[in-house]
C-alpha cells in the first residue's frame, strides 16, 4: 500500500505544482518562500552542527499555538538546542516568525509536499534529532522515512475524530503501519485516544489537551486605543467565516436599537478577507475601519475589522463577550468550531453556534464551568449580548485559574514524556 501511495503522489506532483502556483496568484502563498514546499533546492538549511535539532510540524495557527508554550519552555531550559518549525499556511508562517523573531535558534520553513524524494531530501538536509508532528498532521512518506532513519518521532496533541478515523479505517492495515511509526502518541482528547487505540497505536497516552497551555493574557491594547474603546459598549466576533460576519453586523444593528454607543470588533479567521468585510459594512451604511497592527482606532468607528495576525488575545482581554466563529456555518457541520480556549482563559463569556464538532469536548468542559453557551441563530446572539452588556458579569477568576493550572499540568507532563527521548533539561516551574 505504501508503494501505491508513493506512486500516486509522485504522479500527482505536476498537479500539486500547478495548484501551488494558482494559490500564489491568489496571494495565498508567500511570494518567494513558496518554493520551500516544492523544490529541494529551496529548503534553505541553516543549522548549527554543534546543537541538536528538534523539529515541530504544525499545519496552521491553531496547531502552532498549542505547541508554542512547549517550544518556549524547552528552549528556555536547553541552550544546546535548535528548533525547526514547519507549517503549511501563510498566516501561520507570519505568526511563527513574529513570536520567535528574537530567537536565532528557532527557524521556520514551509512543509514540503509529501512526495518521497522531497521527504528524503528534506530529512537528509536538516537531519533532525527528534521530530514532533502536531494534531492530525499524518503524512506517510515523511513518517516512514523518519522511522527508517531512526529519528525519534512523536505525535503531539493527536486529534483523530470519528470522521478522520472512518477515512483511515478504509485502509486499516496501511493506517496501522503508518501510525506505528510514532514512538509516542499523546492524544488530545478521549475520543482521539479511543480512535488511536482502534488503530492499534503503540505507546499511546492521554495527558489532556495541550491547547490549554497557551496563555497570552499579558497582551493588552495600547492606551490610546483603550481610551477610544472605553467610550463604547464593546463585543467581539472572532475566527469568523463567510456568512458569520453578516450575522455579526445584523447583531450589531439589533444591539444599536438599545445602545447607540455599541462597537463590534470582527476578527476574521482569514485576514485577507478584511476588505470584503469593509464592503459588507458599507452596504449597511455602518462606519467601519480596517485596523492594522499599529493603527489608531477612529473615534466614530462602529465596526472594527482586525487585519493582523496573533493579536486576538488583546481583544479578548478587553471585551468580555465573545462569539467564536465557524459555528453558525451549517455547511461546515462536520468540521465546525474554532478554538475557544484563548477567550476562555481571558475570562470571556463565550457564545457559539450549534456546529462545533471539532471542539466538542472542549466546549463541553467550558459549558460545565458556565463559560460558554450554545446559540441557535443570530437573534439569540443579539439577545444574549444585550443582556450581558446591560449587566456585565465579573470574571470568575477561580475558573480561569483552574484552566491555567490544567494547561500547565499538561505542558509539564508533555515535557516529561519528551524528556525520555531527548534527555532535555527540565524545569517544572
Image (spheres, rainbow, N blue to C red):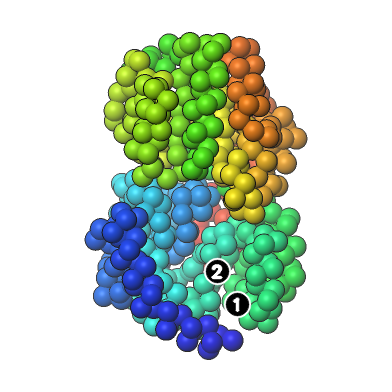
Query: Residue at image x 53%, y 43%?
Result: 214
Q: What residue is drawn where x is 28% and y is 59%?
A: 25
Tell me where residue 173 appears, x and y as whole percent: 68, 82
Q: Which residue is mark 2?
A: 138
**Mark found first going from the N terminus, 1 or 2:** 2
Residue 423 position (above or below residue 178): above
Quick check: 329 above or below 351? below
> Can residue 123 be spotted in the picture?
no
| Percent coordinates x, y for residue 125 in the rendering | 34, 76
Q: Secondary structure at mark 1?
A: helix
Total marks shown come to: 2
Q: Which mark is residue 58?
A: none
* The quarter of the displayed image where residue 153 is located: bottom right
Q: Position of residue 134 (x, y in %)?
A: 54, 60
Q: Are marks 1 and 2 in contact (CB under 8 Å)?
A: yes
Residue 208 image position (x, y, % from top left): 67, 51
Taking the spot 73% from the left edge, 57% from the top edge, the residue there is: 191
The residue to which callout 1 is attached is 178
Residue extending furthest front? Answer: 283
Residue 277 lies in what quarter of the image? top left
Amino acid at each position: 500500500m505504501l508503494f501505491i501511495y508513493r506512486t500516486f503522489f509522485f504522479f500527482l506532483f505536476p498537479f500539486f505544482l500547478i495548484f501551488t502556483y494558482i494559490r500564489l496568484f491568489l496571494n495565498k502563498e508567500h511570494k518567494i518562500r513558496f518554493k520551500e514546499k516544492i523544490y529541494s533546492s529551496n529548503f534553505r538549511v541553516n543549522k548549527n552542527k554543534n546543537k541538536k535539532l528538534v523539529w515541530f510540524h504544525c499545519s496552521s495557527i491553531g496547531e502552532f499555538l498549542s505547541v508554542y508554550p512547549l517550544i518556549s519552555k524547552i528552549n528556555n531550559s536547553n541552550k544546546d538546542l535548535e528548533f525547526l518549525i514547519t507549517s503549511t499556511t501563510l498566516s501561520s508562517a507570519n505568526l511563527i516568525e513574529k513570536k520567535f523573531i528574537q530567537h536565532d535558534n528557532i527557524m521556520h520553513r514551509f512543509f514540503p509536499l509529501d512526495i518521497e524524494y522531497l521527504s528524503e531530501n528534506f530529512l537528509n538536509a536538516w537531519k533532525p534529532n527528534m521530530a514532533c508532528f502536531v494534531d492530525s498532521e499524518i503524512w506517510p512518506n515523511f513518517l516512514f522515512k523518519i522511522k527508517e532513519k531512526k529519528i525519534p518521532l512523536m505525535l503531539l496533541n493527536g486529534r483523530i475524530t470519528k470522521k478522520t478515523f472512518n477515512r483511515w479505517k478504509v485502509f486499516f492495515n496501511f493506517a496501522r503501519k503508518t501510525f506505528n511509526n510514532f514512538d509516542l502518541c499523546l492524544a488530545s482528547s478521549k475520543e482521539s485516544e479511543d480512535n488511536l487505540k482502534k488503530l492499534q497505536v503503540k505507546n499511546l497516552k492521554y495527558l489532556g489537551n495541550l491547547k490549554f497551555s497557551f496563555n497570552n493574557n499579558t497582551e493588552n491594547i495600547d492606551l490610546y486605543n483603550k481610551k477610544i474603546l472605553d467610550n463604547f459598549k464593546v463585543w467581539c466576533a472572532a475566527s469568523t467565516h463567510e456568512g458569520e460576519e453578516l450575522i455579526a453586523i445584523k447583531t450589531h444593528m439589533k444591539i444599536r436599537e438599545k445602545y447607540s454607543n455599541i462597537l463590534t470588533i470582527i476578527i476574521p479567521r482569514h485576514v485577507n478577507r478584511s476588505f470584503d468585510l469593509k464592503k459588507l459594512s458599507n452596504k449597511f451604511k455602518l462606519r467601519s475601519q480596517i485596523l492594522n497592527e499599529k493603527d489608531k482606532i477612529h473615534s466614530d468607528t462602529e465596526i472594527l475589522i482586525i487585519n493582523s495576525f496573533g493579536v486576538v488575545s488583546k481583544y479578548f482581554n478587553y471585551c468580555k463577550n465573545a462569539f467564536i466563529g465557524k459555528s453558525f456555518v451549517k455547511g461546515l457541520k462536520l468540521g465546525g468550531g474554532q478554538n475557544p480556549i484563548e477567550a476562555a482563559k481571558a475570562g470571556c463569556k463565550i457564545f457559539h453556534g450549534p456546529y462545533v464538532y471539532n471542539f466538542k469536548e472542549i466546549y463541553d468542559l467550558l459549558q460545565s464551568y458556565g463559560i460558554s453557551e450554545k446559540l441557535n441563530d443570530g437573534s439569540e446572539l443579539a439577545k444574549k449580548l444585550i443582556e450581558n452588556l446591560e449587566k456585565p458579569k465579573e470574571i470568575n477568576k477561580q475558573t480561569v485559574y483552574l484552566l491555567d493550572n490544567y494547561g500547565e499540568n499538561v505542558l509539564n507532563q508533555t515535557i516529561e514524556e519528551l524528556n525520555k527521548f531527548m534527555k532535555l533539561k527540565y524545569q517544572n516551574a
